Image (cartoon, rainbow, N blue to C red):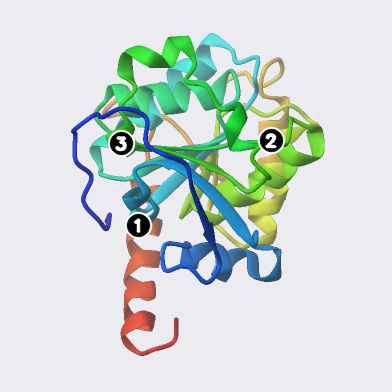
Amino acid sequence: MSKGRVTDDATAAPEIRQISQSDTLYPERLLTVLGKKAPAMLYLQGNVDLLNLNGIGFCGSRKSSRKGIDTVRDCAEQTAVTGLAVVSGNAAGIDFEAHYHSLAAGGATMLVLPEGINHFRIKRALAPVWNWARTLVISQFNPDDVWKGYRAMARNQIIIGLSKAMIVIEASEKGGTMNASMETIKHDMPLYVAEYRDMSVHARGNKKVLELGGRRLARSRSTGRANMKNIFADIERDSAISSRQDQMGLL
């Protein structure tokens, strides 16, 4: 399902690279998904080959419940061992757990920043699993731009654009996760929503996203883990279509 080769040779922090839409490194998928809203510039630090990997986006609350943490760990691990990249926003809570457990499982992850890349620091809790060979930090903002709410919302577009599917782990009824969910639906991308027995406290927005068109991500009775087979099938199908279109010169 994935493209490109990811090595496991951790090195010192690489230099920051700046690429424009005319650069061959610029992800074609961003242009396809976002169109005129695709950022003119991207700032990258890490393994730029990860831009060639198919990815799954993860979003959720900064104040995640124990159930949410267990769920994102399960999904991130399954994503990693399948050879797909985890794409998320480097925030506390669900984002952090997604990045952490992908790396811990030997997978790759892309951290999309809501601020300029000069502000990026590896979180202390991520340091034990950090590997620059399997990590890419991405920002669309000027390097010294500080965090702003509207930048966090804009950053969601990049997560969507770099992903083949999105998973909502825990959403409140308002905020960044709900914004990411709505934007994913607008782009007609596969959107999966973790379904819990009780969503009345930490995942009230999950029910709303399901009503808006999100697809259920439930636990498999046979394995006891999140049933991600439909997500992987969607990505496989999308990749096959893209490959045929590329061969025909349609992309």
Which residue lies under the disc numbered 3?
134
Q: Is residue 72 left or right of residue 143?
A: left
| Residue 80, position as x, y percentages in the image | 30, 36
Inspect this view and state whether residue 181 appears: yes
Q: Earlier in the sequence, mark 1 or mark 3?
A: 1
Inspect this view and state whether residue 208 appears: no
Crowding at label 1, few (<14), some or many (≥20) Cα neighbours within 10 Å? some
Which residue lies under the disc numbered 2?
144
Q: How far apart are marks 3 and 2 (CA)?
A: 25 Å
Which residue lies under the disc numbered 1?
52
- Which residue is more in the foreground, 24 or 198? 24
Picture residue at 35% right of the left edge, 29% below the top: 102
Q: Distance between the residues labelled 1 and 3?
A: 12 Å
Q: In this view, does 125 lie to the left or right of 47?
A: right
Nearer the camera: disc 1 or disc 2: 2
Give the total of numbered labels: 3
Quadrant of the drawing holding the C terminus: bottom left
Residue kind at label 2, given as amino acid type: Asp
Quadrant of the drawing holding the N terminus: bottom left
> Which element carries disc 2, helix, strand or loop?
loop
> Which element carries disc 1, helix, strand or loop?
helix
Q: In this view, does 142 lie to the left or right of 33?
A: right
